[in-house]
Image: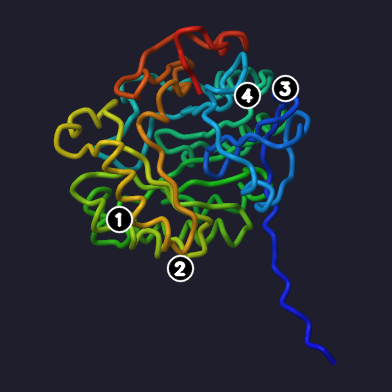
Amino acid sequence: MTPSLPTMTTTVRTFAARPDGAEGVVHDPLTGLTHRTSRALGSGRVRLSATDLASWPEVHPAAVQTDVPISVCWSPVVRCNLACSYCLDDKSVSELARPERHRIANLIAETAVLGVDISGGEPLLLRDLPDLIDVLVAGGCAVSVTTNGTHLARRAEALAGRVDAVRVSLDGPDAERHDRWRGAGSFDHAVTGIRAAIAQDIPTQIQAVLLRSTAQASMRAMVDLAATVGASGVTFLQMLPIGEGAALAGTEQLTDDEALGLLAELKTTAAVPVRLRTRQAAGGFTVIRSDGQIWRNQPGAHAISALRPLHTASDLALTAWDGSA
């Protein structure tokens, strides 16, 4: 008897799509990337294989003809149990009460926004987080949650079957390097959370902000950690000189060219997929902060500007000066 060949498994995940002329665009909630498809897929949430996705080129959202952002970052909470020195959030911003959070979720769900990344602060501190996700999913959005991971183990079961992806922020590939930035015990809690999310079949990736003092020594180890715990990949983020991170920009900020150089050394031998979000790519990105105000990163993401309160779905409309994502 001829032995059978091993069967390759293909990962199928949830994305959000919309037509773009004769083609289409797809937002990936795991990576935050937008891909141009070879065929129109309709509008709303779709199930696609990783093989399909890999065959479609990445495209900057600003290159897509659209009246609203392809994706937004929604930070409905300011509170956080950790204190990252490069945090983008403005701690002076007020936090809307639960009914207002649900109003914002419903407004986003009414638009043609494809992806919503719920961030903070620490979003897992919100008891109503699963309900907010349900509202967005019902509107056709692909939803991710960006978290420090310390509460992920206890929340993973409630998120399973709801959220489309989880992104866990780490500052180092081990407790010694991570806890130096985020506090004793935070690394172990985060890794336990990553394992719990993966056990619940939630697509999970690691995110790490690149700092000049740590990047070169820790990038490969971070990728190795992702492979060890079973994460779907690693996204390295360029530090943005916004919020508390502005004070570190002079000493810790890498140029996009420097960051791309570090990634090039790593990408060809990485055990899991790796990518870089440059500052240039972060320019024009739309943020909804916890007070219900819409903000957008300026070109090059060297600063962020307040636009308007989110009162109606039309308030999310892009304007000519944005070059927005």
- Of all residues, the one furthest to the bottom in this rendering is 1
Cα–Cα span, label 3 and label 2: 42 Å
Q: Earlier in the sequence, mark 1 or mark 4?
A: 4
Q: CA distance from mark 1 to mark 4?
A: 33 Å
Q: Residue 33 has which mark?
A: none
Identify residue type, mark 4: Val
Instruction: Specify the label residue 21 is tagged with.
Output: 3
Q: Amino acid at mark 3?
A: Gly
- Of the image marks 4 and 2, the number of the one nearer the N terminus: 4
Eye-nearest disc, 3 or 2: 3
- The disc, 2 or 1, on the residue closer to the chain's N-terminal end is 1
User: Mark 4 highlights which residue?
Assistant: 113
Q: Secondary structure at mark 4?
A: loop
Expressed as whole percent of the image width and height from the top left, the position of residue 68 reads: 59, 17
Disc number placed over residue 172 in the picture, else none:
1
Give the labeled residue for mark 2. Answer: 228
Location of residue 80 in the rendering, given as x and y in whole percent from the top left corner: 37, 38
Q: Residues within 10 Å of mark 4 (few under 14, many from 20)?
A: many
The residue drawn where x is 36% and y is 14% is 305
Q: Nearer the viewer, residue 27 or 201?
A: 27
Q: Residue at x 59, y 52 (%)?
A: 203
Marks 4/3 in contact by CB < 8 Å: the verdict is no
Task: Tell me the element at label 2.
Answer: helix
Q: Quadrant of the N terminus?
A: bottom right
**Alpha-carbon span between mark 4 and mark 3:** 17 Å
- Height in image: 109 above or below 37? above
Q: How is the image coloured?
A: rainbow
Query: What amino acid does circle 1 point to?
Result: Gly
